[in-house]
Amino acid sequence: MTTRHGTKVTATSHHQHEHDSRQPGSIGGGEVGLCLTRIHHSRYTAATPVVDPVRQRRAEIGVDHERTVADALMEIHEGDIERISATGAGAYRDTETALANGAGVILGGKVASPDGTLVGAPDILVRMPTGYAAVEVKAHLVLGTSGTPAWITPLDALAAIDFSIDIPDEAQGSFRPNRRRDLYQVAHYWRILDALGYAADHPVGGVIGAEEPFTCAWVDLDNGKQSILNTTIDQANQALEAVRHGSDHPDTPLVAPWWRGECNTCEWMPLCHEALVAADDPTLLNHVSDETRTDLVLSGITSISQIASLEPTDERLAEPSVVLQARAWTHGGLLRRPGTPTPIDVSNPRRQVDFDIETYLGRIYLAGFLVTENGESVFDPVVDWEGTETSEADFVARLFDRLASYGDDDTCVFYWTSYEPTVLGAAGERFDLTVPGFDTVQDWFDTCSLDLHRWTKNRFVSPSGYGLKTIAPLCGFDWRDDDPGGQQSEIWFEEMRAGDASMKQRLLDYNEDDVAAQLAIRSWVLSRDDGSGPGSTVPSAADWPQHTHSGPTDCAAESF
Ligand code: SF4
C-alpha cells in the first residue's frame, strides 16, 4: 500500500513488528543522512567502535536538556499529556494507544512503520488540528540568521502554528542549515505517522533547540522540489539498501569509506582512517569528495601520490591546493609554499611570549603565557578556577594588565587563530575593559602580537590541515596528555568543578603544552637552516618530484 504522501508500506499489522530497539533491517530517525558506511559498520562490523568522551559528554548534555524540556511540558500541559514509560513492545503499544486516544502531547513515544523498516523514538508528538507531527529536542542552537524558513511557537501552545504567515516571505525564524539532520529526523517520524494513519495533513516537523526561553521552530517539510521530505525518503531508501547489502556482504560495505567532515566525530574513524591511509586514498585531501574520487579513478588516478605528480592547474581538480597538499602528504611533512622566499621571516625578538586561553561555556578561566628570554622559557599562567561572573571580571582585568606588560618593542606575543582576539574582545566589551594603554583589545593585538596560525599557513603547505595539533607534531612536538583537545579540556574543567582536584594540573599541563607547541614550530623553522637562513632546508611544494620521498605518512585526522 502507498499512503497519501507516498510512504510505501506493506499491508502487515503494525503490532506484528513491534520492537524495542533498532532491528538490523530497519532505519531509525537519527540515522537518516548519516554516512552509509557508518550504517553498515554499526550493524555488521565486529570491531569495537571508539567511544569518544566528547561525544559521550554531548549525549549526556542532550539527555539533560530533553529532561528539562519534558518536565516543563508536563507542568504546562498537565491533563493533556502522556509520558510513555513502558519499554520494549509495550512502548510501541502505549504510543499507538495515546495516538488513538488523541492525547495533546506524547512524550518519549516509540513508533514503527507497519512493515518495520522505519522505526523511531520521537521526543515529542504533538496533536495538530488534522493529526500528529513530531518534535525533537536538541541541546544546540537551531535558529540563525539564515536557513530554512520557520514558524515559531511557545511551549504552552506548541501546535499553534500560524499558517496564515507566509513561508518563506514572512518566516518568524530561520532554521540553521548545519542542523538539517534534525529536520530529516522529524521528517522520518512524520513518514511513520503517515504510514500509521496518524499524521497531520501537511508534513511539518518541529525542533526545540537550546534557545531560551524555549520555543519550537516548525518547518514545512514538503516545500519545493528538493524538499526535506523528499531528501529524507531518498536517504532512508539508500540506508535501507546499504543495510540489505550488508546482510549479504557483512565484510564489504555498499559504499566504501571516504573522508568527510562527519568522520571527525564518527565512532568508526580509526578503522576508516587506517584503511584510507593504507590505500593512499585521494579523499584524504581537502576538496576531494567521493564524486571527485570516482572521476579521478575513471582517468586512471587512484592515489594521493599520483595526484602529487599532476600539474597544480590540472582541470580534474577543484583547485591547485589539492596538488600541493598531495605533495606535502606524500613528502610526509610541511613543504614551503610556492612563492615563499628563503630565508623565511621568523619573528625572533629578545622576549617571545606564547599565549593561549582556555574557556568554558564562553567564559575564560585560564590564560597561559610561555615567556622565552635568553634561551630560557618560563610558563606563567593567569588563572581563575572559581569561574563565576564576578571572578571572571577580576580575572580579565588581571589578564589585560599582563597583556599590557608585554607591550614593549622588544616583545612579540604569539597566538593561534583569531579565537584569542575574538574572545578577549568580547570579554572586554562585557566588562567594559580594555588593555591599559590601548583604545581597544584589538588595537593591542594589532600592535603587539602575531597570529602564528596565519603565519604558518601563508608560508607552508600542510599534509592534513592547519590545526595546532596537526602542525606541531610535524615539527617534532608531542603533547604530554594522550588525549589533548579543546573540547576534552572542557570535560576536565567540569570534572575539576565536580571535585577532582587533579584536573587542575591536567588543565595547566595541557595549556602549557599548547603554548610550548607554538614555540616548537618557530624553533623547527629556525633549525631548518643550511647556513642561508631559517627554513632553507624545507623543500618547496613547487619542486616535484623530489629527489627522495619518505612515503605516505599516518597524518593526524583533522577537519580541513
Ligand atoms: S569514519 Fe567516515 S567514512 Fe568511516 S564510517 Fe565514519 S563517517 Fe563513514
Image (spheres, rainbow, N blue to C red):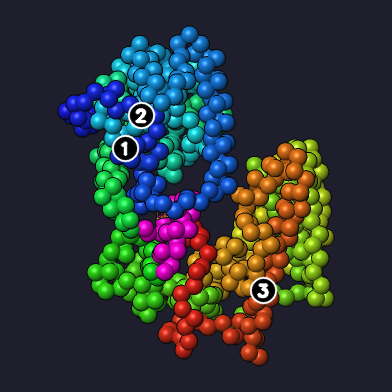
Q: Name the residue carrying label 2.
A: 19
* Residue 484 horizontal/vertical position (percent): 63, 57
* Disc 2 versus disc 3: nearer the observer: 2
Q: What element carries label 2?
A: loop
Observer-nearest of 307 and 498: 498
Q: Name the residue carrying label 3.
A: 522
Q: In this view, does 194 lie to the left or right of 77?
A: left
Q: In this view, does 241 lie to the left or right of 97?
A: left
* Whether the residue under disc 1 has CB within 8 Å of ligand 1: no
Mark 1–mark 2 contact, CB under 8 Å? yes
- Which residue corresponds to the image point at 31% horizontal and 25% vertical from the top-left? 193
Q: Can residue 68 be seen in this view?
A: yes
Assess disc 3: are there few (<14), some (14-19) or many (≥20) residues with their C-alpha within 10 Å of its C-alpha: some
Quadrant of residue 25 within the rendered picture: top left
* Residue 248 horizontal/vertical position (percent): 26, 50
The residues bearing labels 2 and 3 have C-alpha atoms spaced at a distance of 59 Å
Where does the magenta region start and end? 257-278
Q: Name the residue carrying label 1.
A: 26
Looking at the rendered structure, the kind of residue marked 2 is: His
Question: Which is nearer the N-term, disc 3 or disc 1?
Answer: 1
